[in-house]
Amino acid sequence: MNASAATGDLVCFAHGKESGPWGLKITRLAELARRSGFEVMSPDYRQTQDPDERVAMLLALRPRARRLVLAGSSMGGYVSAMACATLQPQALFLMAPALYFPGWDAEPQGIPPLSCIVHGWHDDVVPPERSLRFAQRHRAELHLIDAEHTLNARIELIAMLFAGLLDRVRAD
């Protein structure tokens, strides 16, 4: 798919620091997105561990769509949030987003009103308080769940929340 060509509806995923473009969560959520009529892209960012380089890579792809949804996990959550000002998505879905770390702690801009965050209470990589801070600043929907950082043990709950977000995007 040519990412710069406008499409109808598109979900653009951003994977975490230690995962890949088609890990468990992204594969499950991509399946849901496709069933809901969205095209899906999940770039491979594994060639760099620098979150700002990953943001630049996403922006260089220039994903465009009539309705664009950015979705990211961990460092991919940072990438997705930081890309909002430029890409202007209709919705943002973040899973345990790695926000507000020293050195990459800028406040994301252009966050869409339709934003949903899922974070585990037992996350020992990214403190849940970071998602609370983001949610408060951007009036985002926040779900704190009984899970660790990967959230994999609660994949069906995450899928349900993501499906609800896609339904709201399509309703607009």
Image (cartoon, grey):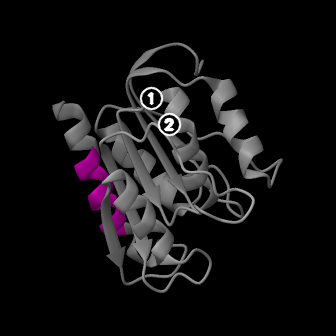
Q: Residue furthest top?
A: 5
Does dot 1 land on a helix, a strand or a loop?
Answer: loop
The answer to which of 97 and 19 lies nearer the viewer is: 97
Q: Residues within 10 Å of mark 1 (few under 14, many from 20)?
A: some
* Residue 136 included in the magenta stretch of the image: no
Query: Which residue in the structure is indicated by mark 2?
Result: 84
Q: How many marks?
A: 2
Residue at image position (59%, 63%) is: 98
Q: Amino acid at mark 1?
A: Gln
Q: Position of residue 17 (x, y in %)?
A: 70, 60
Q: Is residue 10 above or below residue 81?
A: above
133 vs 75, left or right, is left
Q: Amino acid at mark 2?
A: Cys
Q: Is residue 83 above or below residue 18?
A: above
How many angstroms separate mark 1 from mark 2 (CA)?
5 Å
Q: Is residue 21 above or below residue 103?
A: above
Specify start and end residues of the magenta stretch as a single range.
156-165
Figure quadrant of residue 11:
top left
Q: Residue furthest left?
A: 171
Does the image show residue 148?
yes
112 vs 149, left or right, is left
Q: Quadrant of the N terminus?
A: top right
Residue at image position (71%, 35%) is: 56
Query: Which residue in the structure is indicated by mark 1?
Result: 88
The answer to which of 74 and 36 lies nearer the viewer is: 74
Q: Quadrant of the C terminus?
A: top left
Q: Position of residue 40 (x, y in %)?
A: 48, 35
Q: Position of residue 64 (x, y in %)?
A: 49, 21
Q: What secondary structure do most residues of the magenta stretch adopt?
A: helix
46 vs 16, left or right, is right
The answer to which of 142 and 162 lies nearer the viewer is: 142
Q: Are marks 1 and 2 in contact (CB under 8 Å)?
A: yes
